[in-house]
Amino acid sequence: MDSGDLLFKKYRLPISENDRKEMSEKAQLIIDCFNWMAYDAIGIGDDDLSLGKEFLLEISKKARFPFLSSNLIDETSGKTLFQAFLIKEIKGLKIGLFSLLSPDLFKDPSDPRKKGIGFRPPIETAQSIVKELKPKTDFIILLSHLGYSKDVELARTVQGIQIIVGSHTGMNLTTPPVIQNTIILQTASQGKFGGRIDLIFYNNHPTFYNSATKSLLEKNLTRINFRLNSAELPETEKARWQKSKDEIEQNLNKLKGKNEFKNIIFSLHDRMREDPEIKKRIEAHKIRTQTDRNPEPAQ
């Protein structure tokens, strides 16, 4: 999954005709590669609209996965421009996916990226989508292009979203916050990192705690037991350590039988093995681009 700003670099004006051609070809290469990678869904980011609404609609037809945006609408018809949500069933688990784009990211009223589009309020849209998805799914994921602070606000306001895969702010949340039973994820920008979340289900309740919390408690318990087994430990200090041990054991008992998650962020670097099919597509794109820039002289 991707939460937006997939197709282009940071938006800059003006965009010349040569730049438009190059940006268009590169965006098509990205979609081609993501098709090969068998992506499940992407959300729309503000920079994905760099070449305008019509281009994004056209290139979305070449993707073998849905472009999702629940609050991006056509200014004339008032209808959503892209698929509002997706329900995927994986090994008996029904997962609902939807996406939101913040109108606050388009600060200039004359921003050409906004031409022909409008926005439904993100929080109201989220409440409506969750209400529709909840009876049909076991699990709801939001692909958010709102920014981290807005993700936190939404998690506090809208109940029923298990995971927010955030973007735009561009930071690695190695220890994701859990707010009102919603896990907020995010990796840094420019495609330098990938993220994976492992979910372990012990029951049907869709709430999770970070397994790193359990690991830390267990490490502290081992350290305390070592101190308590010391023959030189004074009785007054022993009582203090015993109290800490009891508290940790109580906290560990509270976690028993509860669902847990583990978050992993990994660097995507040059030393990683390249997929031969994607490498072939990129090399073909480079050759084609070089030929366009330096055409052979006419005979």
Image (cartoon, rainbow, N blue to C red):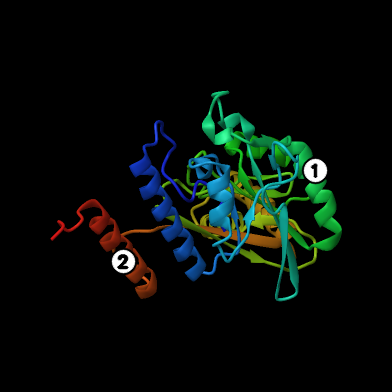
Q: Specify whether 132 is left or right of 21.
A: right
Whether residue 33 is situated above or below residue 57 in the rendered picture: below
- Residue type of the residue flagged with mark 1: Gln
- Residue type of the residue flagged with mark 2: Ala
Residue plotted at (76% across, 41% down): 125
Q: What element carries label 2?
A: helix
Give whichever of 257, 88 is nearer the camera: 88
Q: Specify whether 173 is left or right of 269.
A: right
Q: Specify whether 256 is left or right of 112.
A: right
Q: Name the residue under label 2.
A: 284
Residue 256 got which mark?
Answer: none
Give whichever of 58, 152 is nearer the camera: 58
Give whichever of 43, 268 is nearer the camera: 43
Residue plotted at (68% across, 58% down): 252
- What is the x, y in percent for residue 46? 54, 39
Q: Residue furthest top?
A: 109
Q: Which of marks 1 and 2 is nearer the N terminus?
A: 1
Q: Which residue lies furthest to the front in this view?
A: 299
- What is the x, y in percent for residue 299? 13, 61
Whether residue 56 is situated above or below residue 28 in the rendered picture: above
Residue 127 got which mark?
Answer: 1
- What is the x, y in percent for residue 41? 60, 59
